[in-house]
Structures are given as structure tokens and as C-alpha cells.
Amino acid sequence: MELKQHLPSAADLCVTRRQFLNRFGMGFGALSLGSLLGSQFMGGSSAQADTNLSPLVVKEPHFPAKAKRVIHIFAQGGPSHLDTWDPKPGLEKYRDKDVKEIGGVPLVSPFKFKKTGKSGIEVSELFPKIGESIDEISVIRSMYTDIPAHEFATLMMNTGSGRIVKPSMGSWSLYGLGSVNQNLPGFISLAPNGNVLGGSSNWRSAFLPGAFQGTMVSTGNMSAEKVIENLKNYYTPLKDQREQLDLVQKFNELHNQNMKREAELEARIQSFELAFQMQTEAVDAFDISKEPDHIKEMYGSGTQGRQMLVARRLVEKGVRFVQVWDSGWDHHANLQSVIARKAQDCDQAIGALLKDLKQRGMLEDTLVLWGGEFGRTPRHDRGGRGEPGRDHHNRSFVAWMAGGGVKGGNVHGASDEFGYNAVEDKVHVHDLHATILKLLGFDHEKLTYRYNGRDFRLTDVYGNVVDDLIA
Amino acid sequence: MTKMSLKQVLPVAIVLAGSAWGASAADAKLDPKQLEFFEKRIRPVLASACYDCHSTAPDAKVKGGLVVDSKEGLLKGGDSGPSVVPGNPKKSLLIEAVEYHNKDLKMPPKEDNRLTDEQVADLVAWVQMGAPDPRVGTAPAMKTISIEESRSHWAFQPIQNPPVPKVADKGGFVKTDVDRFILEKLKEKGLTPSPQIDKRSLIRRAAYDLIGLPPTPEEVEDFVKDKSPNAFAKVVDRYLASPRYGERWGRHWLDVARYADNTGDRLNRGTPNYPFSWTYRDYVIQSFNEDKPFNQFILEQIAADRVVKGDDKSDMAAMGFLTVGKRFMGNQEDVIDDRIDVVTQGFMGLTVSCARCHDHKFDPIPTKDYYALHGVFSSSVEPEKGPFITPPKETPEYADFKAKLAELEDELADTARSEYEKSLTQLRSRFGEVLLGTYQYGTSKNNAALRSFLREKTVNANAYEAWAKALKKMSNEPGPVMKPWFDYAALSKDEFSGKAAGITAKLAKDSNVNPLVASALVKAEPKSIEEVSEVYGKLFKGMEKAWADAKANGVAGMKDEYEEQIRLVLHGPKSPLYLNTKDARTLQLVGGAQIRNFENRVQNKIYTLETTHPGSPARAMVLEDATRPRDSFVLVRGERGRKGDPAPRQFLQILSKDTPQKLNTGSGRIDLAEAIADRNNPLTARVIVNRIWAKHFGEGLVRTISDFGLRAEPPSHPELLDHLSTWFMDNGWSIKKLHRYLMLSGVYQQGSVDSAKYEEVDPANLYLWKMPIHRLDFEAIRDTVLMHGGNLDLAAGGKPVDITENPSPNRRTVYGRVDRFALPEMFRTFDFANPDMTTSVRNPTTVPQQALFMMNSPFVIDQAKLMVQRTDFLARKTDAEKVKFLFQTLFQRDPSASEISMAQQYLQAQAAKDVKPVTGKEDWSYGYGYYDPKTKQVRFRAMTDNTANTYTGGKKGGSAYLSAAGGMPGSVAKFGVIRRWTAPKDGRIFISGPLTHKEKEGDGIAARVVSSRAGEVGAWNLKQSRQDVVIEHMDVKAGDTVDFIVDCRANSEGDRFVWLPVIRMEDGPEWNARAQFTLPSKSKEQTPLNSWEKLAQALFLTNELIYVN
């Protein structure tokens, strides 16, 4: 399979079974995790028999990665680009006029934009706090996608496929890079009630092995035990469990001697040790009460504040890919009031996240992606009741990225004068995916997985890297 | 733009005009002027704009199969066909692409890099002059795989029956012919097989292999004792005959069949269940159990509708193979693709679905072959209701089911009808808009401008289309109302203003025109078609209103003849609006989202009813041949609406000798099934034999189990594969016989001994110098744990159960519900097969979540507890015997002396922590109330609130509480606190125990002991004093209560007390109120495991339980 050529094979990881035995024959406990937990997926079928180690071992990508981890803030519902990141003051002259090009009367954005930062990028008054980090951000004003239907486009954004269940972006990242913290899932999806449009298809590993699956965490009722099934034993205190495991490992050691130490058996032994540690360490990751007050205040006490803070804690602990769901951007009516409320909830939190990552020195290798599944029409939504709103629109929308090797203070692409069609430097969702993989160190055409005789990839047969977004 | 540039190149074109164009001309020596033009104008453009993605250069890509860095590459073209047709720019895709008119074909793809008008014009001129091109080089051959050349690929060669190698066998390894093939290869490589494995390990290996469960200790002992030469054959036969066998091997096939119990779609917040997917699962299990010949198994799964004869229709369920896949939100193309995929990969190891968008890149499967099969599946339809598996009996459950179903179906029909009426009414008021639309945009809705017009006028596009087409027909016979419209509409935009007045002028006199229409038009004097449509719109709206009023009075039509004419245009049988209401699709389209949503909701309810109702009779999920089967067309790049060549239904070319077999009996499914099950098909037997080999030996003889194409790994033992394939077919395609043949071989029965030396020679164990160890899969782990807990429910078949519940149902895992939409964590953690696509090999991973499941899940803990409650465990007398029992049961062997001592040491160390179970605590209850001397009864209400260590009186009780040692009454005498003992049996009791009150404030407390049989048996008032409460010799019957009541007397200050009653029964048992005091547990904490339970669980956690060698 393709990957073999570009990722270290099992042999490169020094873990053919024979070498493994020679090198690590001293038994379990003496091994570092990284060396023990190789992958059986990287080596193609003939090498598969040689190792049987954890699929989540840290792997080197094709070329040095600028981004080591990702926080994907998914503004689900189709946020209006025209009120957030793609100002169209020119619409004013069409106010109350029927404009053929957009199929109706334009809704002139009720929000003001202000040139911000050194780059002077115009930032909507909806996002003053995010605006403070504008010089870290690349705004893409020429996104487009295939279909303006929520579920299809949501899956498209997360998996590169609207209907057929394919592995999600996070699963591909985890597959390619592994995870530095084996005590937590390497790919975590956060949502206030755990229930999002499209459900688990958004974080599925599909045909990739289950170890690369995302784990949904309901942040409304957040506890590590809910995140990781069977994390807590309600029968046996930890100390007793340790004694029990010691006995198990003694039996295993005898068994191993008979079996001449199969690497596979060693890996399973080690997995119990990991599981034991996980019970205490995973709990800590979700406990935001451990944060100092000034940090909690900085993020704010709203839903997004809580989510962003957890997201930061998770990436700090080595989780490779965190997705934060911020649903409710579907503004068919009452745009002015509803979108303002929506933005208020997340502006402080996202602004804080960017600054917090920066002050910890993490922004440079943490990629933050913000965006929805599509944008909204420049014209009034005819179906909406109440004050005006906008309809679904796939021909032009926005996304922005920050950190992780992204060019800061940058605007890429443009839509037409109405914000109806992306026209300059258009970026399809596949192109965005190709670019994200590039930042993570991958040639998107070569990060493949062979399944049923076919090499699959995140970008299917599409995708062009947008070099202008990369610093 | 083009004009100007053309001028520039005109001289060249003229010079060349006399020569003959086309490929032959281009082959001739190039005119120097042509050459110059090419080098100056064309080559630089191609090189800078195209080569990055379309050239043979080492670092370039070859997108769409197209290279443009050679003449041949351009002429041959890519996936979409030739790029350049010399002399014909209009037919040249290259030109189409650079012109940027086709939104789906724009090159270069980035707008930024778009060619200048001048560059485009140059290219056009160049193609026009015959595309003279001096470049040599060949297009890469990778695009199309030649079918003829591919025939030599081993997998497409006929299956041979190679001679069995003669090979010397000194070690007594050879047991069957299989071994001779193996031994020959081993010798070639200088390897020898591992020694025969011990009997205990062998029976464990055989049991897990065949039935997915461990052997019982009795089975093990029988086998160990059996010294006869066919002892192992008996074991194999016994497991093959077990109904557990089909559950194990059926599940392997269900992986291939991407089995799941729901569609994977999400509709109205529900995911539709397949109510009857389980009938397919049971069919598969049963087929394995009855050893259905595999060729028959193929026929039934693809075409049971044609092969199942007789009254017993249960095998119709076989077609679940095709129908239990994902439904892709109703996208039929994807559904067909899924079916083609599961059939071709499942039976033949070919990835035909790769050819959906382009000729297969690696295998000799052209797109045409894909669409040949596409025709077969698009000519197969699912009936609304599948046939009954067995005719339902008229039971009360069935009657109830039918009644409930009818209710839902009525609801559906009623609502659909009324929603439809509503939308029709709305449409009638849009008549003017539709008329205008047809004038301006025609009848097809596939027009962006029209769609935007319709959106603006809020006209449903689907309705519009149906309606516009009906109008078009009407133009032949317009009738008095519509005639003027068609007259006006015949005018073009330009002539309208000139000629409309003429039409209007004639109207009044025209007897063929409805006078109401005529006068309205005359009055309006329309100057544009818009105005005409407005007149009509108003007329019809007015008529709708008038008709609504008239209808309310119960008339059948308008009285006025002319009004009736207008009404009939909207309501009459010839009305263009009289859409076919029986056509469900039209109805849906017109009714729009409301009807669809509603239908989905009710349909989901129907699915749920069918899934859950006990009276719901099982149906088979079948396909039937469409009444008019049809061939499909190639869809270029798999895109709808890009029709290519017709693709007659026929079998794959690579598997056909000359003319491919036609697939045209009905849909052609039966022909397809027969072509697959044909003895001469080189793939079918090899693929299934290899699958079965792989399950026994860990890897296939061909390691790419689902891919036998050109990129497949060649078989490690090609002759053996053919030998087995021939043997298999000669033996009636019997899978059970094949198991037996394989398992009785020496290679199967060898040990798993590792060898450093051999590891160097053959690290992948390709030549089978040992049997690889393997880990139990998800089903085997769960079933094993259940079996050891003594609780495995061996009931077979039926509706799926939810095994993720706690406590978990005790059924075998194969009967667990497979939720494709949200595959439960547990399934994923243990690498369950991907239910979205056919799975040949599960990818085993080792992750800590698996360890957590074994360590912490209530499921495993429960079974560990149950294991040491088994009577056969308890029957063992000594600790050592008990440890032995555990090892024998779990590992099929006795523990070593050191293992016994390790276990005993552990037990001793843990015993100190064992919590002695407190018995009798359930005989105490806690409440409040008072003693009524008149009735001699106690008014007792249970306390429902509690803190960490007391019961409290809740809102009513103020600070009243009861603790282990005492408590405090409420602030009124009727709120005494009561500790109640209920006699569990008859007997004579003695009560004793000190009662203490210490506090200064208030008037102290009143205490009494009351029996439900005897009333008050003792009463005391205390203040700052101590009383030894003793009641001697009281007889109680089971169920009697004794209450210890304390109240506050008149003053509620300072009433805390300590009372430690003990009840002793004459024959021994004792109840201690303090020691047995218990609170309801709010936390999830459970009683800790005792030492034996912990030991049993520890053994569940070992590698030895999970690995089979």
C-alpha cells in the first residue's frame, strides 16, 4: 500500500518480531511505550505478521509537520459569511432592489466591520475578541461545497463524503500520526449534548480500524467515565485491582515463557498497564475545575467557554484531534438578533483559546480551524418567518485557520460583489482537507488506506493544496 | 475575442487548407510553418498549464488518466475519451476544457491559471489545422488494463487438479494430501513443521475454530482418554454437527455480507430498522448448519426468487445478502454499487465497483462491465412487502399486530391525501405563474433561471414540470379557455408588442373563445406576455374562490356554462393539473417535504412495529425482477446525466471466453448467480476455499483475501489452492467436508512453537512451519465469558437482542443487534467487522479499552462472580481443587504446582479484605409515625430521604433522623422515629439493648416497643438517663413487625438518643440494629468482589484465555 513508502514501516520502527525479541526479551515493564506500541497497519500485508502492536503509536508523517494537533471548531448550521468574515458593503446600493444575480432582494448585513490588527483585515463587530488575534489568522473567503443540505454538507466537511460513510478527518489524522497520549482517545469530539446532525458518521473511522474512531463527549454532562466506557471499576478499589493485575501478569509471564514471548502477547500485557493508568489520568483531563480562576474567566462561563477550555486541556495532554461542535448557525430568520447572540457565546471563548494557546507557545504547532458546512444567501430567505434571515448557500462561504503553520493576517480568495459565488482562488472542501493534511505533514494523495482492494484517501480523487494559506 | 485571435493565425490556416486532415496527415512530415506554430504557440502553453498534472515526467501526476506531453497521449486521451480530435475543435475535450464553458470540465482547474483568450484561440486554431504535433512518446499504459493480456494472471486461469507431490516424510507429519503440498514447500525452504500439538490444546483449537466456544472439561477428558486413531476425527465431527457451528461460521459469512440490522440512514431523528434482517442472519446460520452446498448458497443469495421452489419459502430470506446493506439516504446508484460490490468481492474477490467512474486502474474490469451488472441490479426491485417466511397463523398476537399496522397505514394514507389536496389547492392559485414560466423557460426544470423564477414565485419545481408538460399537450386541443393563451404564446418576444393587439381585437368575435376570458383580455389590452399571464392568474384565482363557495353548497359544478369551462381547466379530468394521484412519486413530489417527512415518520413507526411486535410475522427481504428489465448506459465518471455507451447486461469479460454470457433472464440475476456458481468460473471456488483456509490458519493461501485481481499477492501454495478447489467442488461444494479435510491434516494439528532460525528464513510463516497463535474475536470472547459464568443461553435465531444493555442478555453474540448507524463502542473496541462494506479480515488491534472492558465492565465482573457460584465449582472441596477447576474449565488443563501456589497465596492475601456479608439487614426498615393505643397499631411511614449516614425526615420531619446507633424524633409527638424489625420466620425472640438520653434541654423522650401481634410491650420516658430495655420471651410469626419508637413528648428540644437493640431468636440467629443498619446506596459503588471472585476475574484477564495456539 502507498503508505508503506512514506511512513516508517514496521521494520523501520525496529519491531520485527525477531528484533523485538532480541531487543526487548527482558520482559514487560522495561519497554517505553513508543517502542512497544508499533503498528501493524503500516507495513502492508506481509509485514502484518511481523508485528502486532498498538495502532496508535506516534508515527512520522511524509514531511515535517507544521501542525502537531488540530482543534476544529465546527460552526454547524451554515454560518453567514456575509455577517462574519466576508463583508460586502457594496450590497448597500442594491438595498430593496431585486437583484437577478442573487435571485432576490439582498439582505444588507446589519453588522459593522472594522479594519483590525496590523494586517488591517476587516473583522465583524460580532467577533471583537477573535479579532484581537487576527494577525494569526488566514481567512478563506472563497470556500464552496457541493450541496446546500445540512447533513450532506456536514458529513462532507468532516469526512470528504456526503453520503457514503468514510473515515473522518480526525480518524485520518490519527491513522497517519498516532497519538502521543495513550491514556486518552486520540480523537475527541465535544458537543454540548452529544447529539449532532449526522451523528457518529461525523467522527467514524469507517473502514479504518476502530482504534482511530473519534470519541464523542457530551460536554453538558462531562465526566471522563462517560467518555471512556468502563473507565471506572465500581467493585474493586484501585489498590486491590493493582494486586489483581499483578497476579494476572504473573500468570501471563508463565504463559509467555511457554509461548516464547510473542510480541503480540507482550502488547496485550502492556495494554492492561495502560488501562490501569488511564483510570486516573483520563479523569484529570476533563476536570476544568483544576484551571486557575483567571483562565476560567478568560474563557467565560458559557457553553463554548467550557468546551474551548476542555479542548485546550485535551490538546495539551496530547490528544491529536479535538473537534468542538458549536451548532445553531442556521439563521433563516431574525438574523440580526440571533446571530449576535450566537456569536457572543463563542467570540470570547474562541478569542481566549487563541490567546491561551499563544501564551503557552502551543499555537505555532496547533492548528485551529473554524467554519461551518456552507454559507448563506446574500438575499432574504423567503421562507423565514419574523425578521429577515438568510437561506442555505453552498456556492460561497468562509472558513478560517490559525496557528499550526498557517499564514497569519492573511485573506485568501474572494467571492463576487454580492458574496454569491466564490470567484477568486476558490477552495473546495477537498482542497481545505488537502491543505490541512499538508500542514499535518502529509501528501494527501499518499495518505491512503488499502481496503477491499482499493486505496482510499480523505480527498477521494480530488483536492489541491492551497499554498497561500501556509506560512 | 476569438475573432481577433483567429485573424492572427489565419495566414497559417490558409496555407494549410489544402492538405488532408486527420491522424494520417498528422503522421506525415510536418510542415515547417506548422512546426513553428506548434513550438511557439502550443508547446509552451501545454507545458506551463498542463504538464504538472498530465505528463509522464517523474514528478508529475497523471490525473484523469490523461497525459498531454506526447501526441499519442493527446489523441488517446484519458478517462473521458480523446482530448483532441484533429480538425474538430468542437469535439475536442481539450478545447472544451480550456474554454471554461462547461462547469464540470474546466482546465486548468484553478481560475487563476485560466488561459488567456489568445492562448485559447491558438489552441482552437491548432486543432482546426489538424493538431500537428512533433512530439513522440507514449501515453502511459496504466489507464486501461488489457483484458487479453490479463488472461494469463493466475487467478483467471482455469482451476487445475495438480498431481499430489511425492515427498518423503520421515517425521510422520503427513496425514492427508494437503500435507504433501505443504511439506514439499517447507523442504524447498529448508524448514520442517512443528511437532504435533498436545491433545488438550488441539481440542481447544478445534472447538474455537468450529463453534467459537471452549470445549467443556468433559469433552477434553473424553478426547484425552480416547486412544483410537480416529479420536480427533470424532471431535471434529461432533463440533461440525453442533448447532453452534452455524452460529460461528455463519457469522464469518455475515462479515462478508456486511450484515446489519438497520439502514444506516437517519430519518426524522430515527434510524430505520430492518424489521427482518435477522431472517437473513438465521438463513445463513442454518445454511452452514445443514451444510448447504456452496454453489446452491450462491444461487439462493443472489436469486432465491428463481431457485426456491415448493411451499417452504424460508430460503427466500437468502436475498438479504443483497438487501441488508446501507441505503445511502435513498440514493439508488449507491445502493446498486453496494450490491455489485458485495457480490463481486464476496464471491469472486474482484473489486468491480472500482469501475463505476473509470475503467479499473489495476484490474481488467472496464466501466462497461460495471454497467452491465448495473443493469442487472437496476432491473431488480424490492417489493413493498417481502413474502412471509412461513404463513402467519391467526393468533391473537397476529390479529393485534394487523390492527395496529392497519391503523398506521390508514393514518399514512389519510394524511398523504389531505396534504396532497392542500398542495394542489395552492398550485391552482399559481396558474398564471406557471403559464409565464412555460413561455419564458420551457417545460424542463433543469434550468437555473427557471428554478430561480420558480423559487421567487414559490412554485414547486417538480409540480411545475409535470404541469408544464401537460400544458404542452393541451396546446393541440386548447379549448375555449386556453386558446387565447396559446395564440399569444406563439408570438416571440420581439413581435409581441406588434401583433398582440391583433389577437386581442379578434377575441370578442371568436366563438371558440370563452367570453369571460375574452372580455378580461380585451379589458386589459395586454402589452406583454406577463400581462396575459396576470389576466389568466386573476381569472383562475377568482374562479377558485367562487368554486370554493359553490362547493360548500354541495353543487357538482358551476352553474354558468362559461364559468364551468374555466373551472374544468383547474379541476376537470383533462386539466393539466390533474396529475396522476395514484403515482406515489408524483404525489410525493407535489406534496413536498411535508408529505415526505410525515411518511418517513409513519414508515419508521411501521418498521418499529414490525421489529418489536411479538405478532409481527417474519418476511424475507427479497428482490424481484422488474416487469421491464433494462440495460443500463455507462455513466461517464459515474455521474448521473452523463450517459455514455449502452452497456448490455452480460457477465464480466475477463471471465468469459469469447462473447460474454448474456444476463437477461428477467433482471439477469439468476444468470449472474449461475455464472458465478459455475464450476468453470476460475475464481469462485478458489475464493471460498481461501476464505475457509484463512479462518483455520490465520492467513489465506492468497493473503489478499478479498482481492484476487492483478495486484493480489500470488498464492503461497498455488497447487494446493487448486487441489483444494477441485477437491471442494468434487465433494459437492461441501464446506463441512472441507473443514474436516483441512483439520485432519498434519499441518492443522502441528504446534505453535516459535523458532528463531525459521523466523529469519520465513518471518511471515508463509510456508506454515508452525500454526500461528490467534486471539479470540469479539464474539468468541463474549460467548466464552458467558459460558464460564454458566449462563450462556443457547437459544437459536430470532429477533436481535441488545447486548449492550446492563445486565446483558445471555444470548450468543451473533444474535446481538448490529446498529450500523451507531455501532456501539463495545463492538468497535473489539474490532468488529465494518458493517458498511464487505469485510474479509477483521483488523485485530490491542488497545487499552479492551483491557478496561475485561477489568471493569459489569458484564465481565458479573460472570466472574457467577463462575464461583456454579455448583460444579462449589462441589470442589479444597482450595487447590477449586483452583484446579478454574484452570480446567478456562484453559483445558491442570494448573502447575507453582500456579496453584500463586493462586493460593493470592487468595490468602485477599481473604483478609473479604467483606463478611451482613445478613439480616434486609429485616430492618426505617420510618416515622406514632403508636395509636386505641387501635393498637403503629402508623408507619418509610423515611425516603437520607444523608451519607442517616435517614432523615425530609421536609415534614425537620431535623428528625435515624442513625445506626440512635436518632432524634421530630418536633411533634406524632412524628416519632421508628426502627422496625420484620420477623423473617416464626420463633421466640428476646430483645435487649441500652437506651440513653443525655441532653439537658427540654423534657426528654418517650420510647416504646410495639409488636404487631401484641401491641405495646414496653414504654419508657427518659431524660438524661439510661435504660436497659429488655423484652423476654415474645413469640412471633413470619411477617410480624416489632417497632422501636421514640417521640419528643411535649417539648421538642434536646431529644437526641442512643438505642442499641439486639434481637435474639431462641434457635440461634441474632439481629443487631446497629451492625445491620444500612442506607440505600446512591453511589454506583458495588459490594467489592471477594477473593475467589477476584481470582476468577483475574483468570478471565489472562492472555491464556484469549489466545488459542
Image (tube, coloured by chain):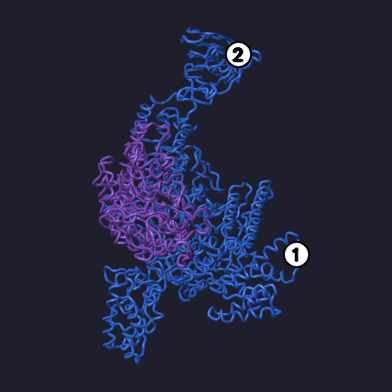
Judged left or right of residue A179, residue B689 is: right
Question: Residue at the location (65% across, 67% down)?
Answer: B540
Query: Could you say where residue A446 lies in the image, as x and y percent from the top left?
Result: 32, 61
- Please provide percent x and percent y for residue B307: 58, 63
Q: Nearer the viewer, residue B1065 or B658?
A: B1065
Residue A92 horizontal side relative to residue B61, left or right: right
Residue B149 drawn above or below residue B929: below
Pinpoint residue B501: horizontal percent, then vertical percent.
Answer: 61, 80
In the rendered structure, the answer to whether residue B298 lies left or right of residue A441 reads: right
Label 1 – label 2 distance at C-alpha: 90 Å
* Picture residue at 42% right of the left edge, 53% below the top: B695
Assign a secondary structure to mark 1: loop
Please say if A18 is above or below B935: below
Amino acid found under the numbered disc labelled 2: Asp
Query: Which of the 4 quarters of the picture holds residue B1021?
Result: top right
**Residue that carries the numbered disc 1 in the rendered image:** B556
Letter of the chain shown purple in the rendering: A
Using the image, tell me which numbered label, if any, was put on residue B1035.
Answer: 2
Q: Say the numbered circle drawn on residue A441.
A: none
Quarter the N terminus of chain B occupies: bottom left
Note whether residue B175 is visible.
no
Determine whether the residue tagged by mark 2 lies in a helix, strand or loop: strand
Label 1 vs 2, first from the N-terminus: 1
State whether discs 1 and 2 lie on one chain: yes
* Rendered shade, chain B: blue
Chain at numbered mark 1: B
The mark lying in front, picked from 1 and 2, is 1
Tell me if B423 is positioned left or right of A300 in this view. right
**Residue B768 percent across, percent down from the top left:** 34, 54
* Residue type at the position of mark 1: Ala
